Amino acid sequence: MKKIFIIIFFASFVSVTIPQTKLQIKGAWIRPAAQGGNSALFFEVMNNSNQSDTLIAITFEHSEIVEIHETFKRSNDMMGMRSVEYVLVPSKSTVKFKPRGLHIMLIGLTKDIKIGEQYEVKLVFKKARDVRIKAVVSDMPKAN
Ligand SMILES: [Cu+2]
C-alpha cells in the first residue's frame, strides 16, 4: 500500500513539472573541433503554443563563452556573423539554427569535441525557462 502511495506521489509530481513548455527542440548537433578552438551548435525550435517565446541564453560546460549568432551579408557580398541578445520564437512556428544562419557559437573549447560524442546543452527561454537537450557531434546536419 505504501508503495502505491509513493508511485502516485511521483506520478503527480512529474505531471506538474514537465508540461510547462510547448517548445520542442529537434535535431541538435555540434560541429567537431579541437580544444582551444571554436565550434557551433545547431537545432530547430518548434513552438506549438499560442504564445511566442524568446531564447535568451545557452549553457554549454565545455566552452569559455557561448553566444547566439546570426549570419548577415556584408556590403561586399561576403558573409559575416555577429552576436545577438535573443531570438524570438513566434507562436505556431519553427525557428531553425543552421549553418549560414542562426547558430550558437561555442568559443574557446576546453576539450576536444569529437564526432559521435553527445553533450548536454541547456537552452533558457523567457517563458519555458530551462530546456535541457542532448546534441550529437557530427560534421553534417542531423537527419530529423
Ligand atoms: Cu558564429
Image (cartoon, rainbow, N blue to C red):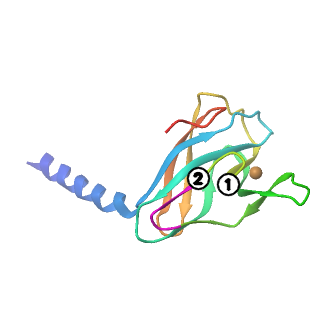
Residue toward you, 92 or 106: 92
Q: Which residue position is annotated with label 1?
A: 102
Q: Which residue position is annotated with label 2?
A: 96
**Disc number placed over residue 5 in the picture, else none:** none
Check the image and report above or below for 50 versus 98. below
Rate crowding at label 1 as few (under 14), some (14 to 19) or many (20 or more) other CA atoms within 10 Å. many
Residue 7: where, in percent of width, then height? 19, 49
Residue 91 part of the magenta segment: yes
Magenta region: 90-95
Question: Distance from label 2 to label 1 (Cα)?
Answer: 7 Å
Report if the CB atoms under discs 2 and 1 are less than 8 Å apart.
Answer: yes
Residue toward you, 134 or 110: 134
Look at 49% across and 46% down and name the residue there.
26
**Mark 2 falls on what kind of element?**
strand
Residue 105: where, in percent of width, then height? 72, 50
Ranked by sequence position, the earlier of labels 2 and 1 is 2
Look at 36% across and 57% down and name the residue there.
18
